Amino acid sequence: AIVAGQLAGAVASRGGPTAPFELSVLFLALGASLVLAFWRENAGGSQSQSSAPSAEAEAESAGKEPEKKAKDDETADNASAQSRKESGGEIVRNAFSAMVADKRIMLVGGVQALFEGAMYIFVLQWPPAFKAALSGAVPFGKVFSCFMVSCMIGSSLFSALSKRSVAAEDSVAAMLAVAASAMAAATFACKAAALPALIASFFAFEACVGMYFPLIGTLRSKYLPDAYRGVIMNFFSIPLNLIVVGVFLSIGRLGVTGALTCSTAALATALLASLGLKATARGDEKRSVA
């Protein structure tokens, strides 16, 4: 990604603003060729294959008492029948019920929707923000490469904190506090056309983006049930899209500064959700110890 920014800047300087998009077609074609050549579709085994016991399972089953073996077979048959009965509509309803019933899932969803909404607003507003603060031409490729370096620093920081056994709930709260502060500083810097402060604020926010993705993956794996994780994540995308579409339908009135203000508000609200998640997790730990 760092090299891609430099390459995009180089071709844009020669071929104009559409040149990076034209160059990207080559990389997309290369990626598609690699997928066609090396990837194999995982269609899963047939029912007869999946239901056939292995040699180890048959040996273990032979040593069981008849009553216990029959009970295990009945339990497995009931679970299999239950999975077959669950239709698409039931999966969505059950996923929604599981999400609403667990406060922690709702808080994780709030963090995800609000942070990513703020991030997408930033993605579309940093070019006009730099144009407003910089009198000459903006080196977009170099700026993008610096953003990717900042993301890498954030990911490395997450790895360092994980090795020190810092809880994900603590890390995400600290990260959101920095992200909200950085976006607030960027809003004021954009209004004052203060380029150094704007650069520093955007780089700090990009470092938070680098921390965010492994953190939210950790929280989702911890709190979202495996059976409904994909459906619940789709539910989370609804408020995310409402935030982004709502801001950009009003961009004529908001302007760059107004959009960054909305991003700051979303990050501050995500911080409150993360603090609620942190408090809930601490309460669960205390109850489990007691």
Image (cartoon, rainbow, N blue to C red):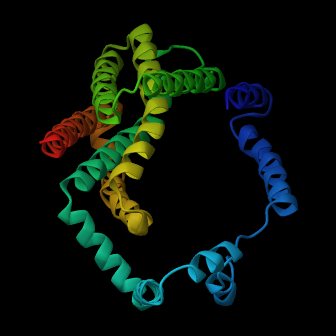
Camera sees residue 124: no
Classify the position of the C terminus by image quarter: top left
Horizontal side of 110 relative to 135 (left or right) equals left
> Which percent across, then down, holds residue 174?
30, 25
Question: Which residue is drawn at the image coordinates 66% and 72% (left, top)?
Answer: 56
Question: Which residue is drawn at the image coordinates 47% and 39% (left, top)?
Answer: 213
Query: In the image shown, does 25 or 57 lie closer to the viewer?
Result: 57
**In the picture shown, does residue 32 fall above or below 48?**
above
Classify the position of the N terminus by image quarter: top right
Q: Quadrant of residue 168?
A: top left
Horizontal side of 70 relative to 172 (left or right) equals right
Query: In the image shown, does 280 or 172 lie closer to the viewer?
Result: 280
> Which percent across, then down, holds residue 154?
49, 24
Horizontal side of 16 relative to 227 (left or right) equals right
> Which percent across, then down, holds residue 64?
51, 80
Q: Quadrant of residue 10?
A: top right
Question: Which residue is drawn at the image coordinates 68% and 36% (left, top)?
Answer: 17
Horizontal side of 103 relative to 36 (left or right) equals left
Q: Quadrant of residue 208?
A: top left
Query: In the image shown, does 272 or 30 lie closer to the viewer?
Result: 272
Q: How many marks?
A: 0
**In the picture shown, does residue 147 fall above or below 78?**
above
Camera sees residue 146: yes
Question: Which residue is drawn at the image coordinates 27% and 32% (left, top)?
Answer: 264
> Which percent across, then down, holds residue 195?
44, 11
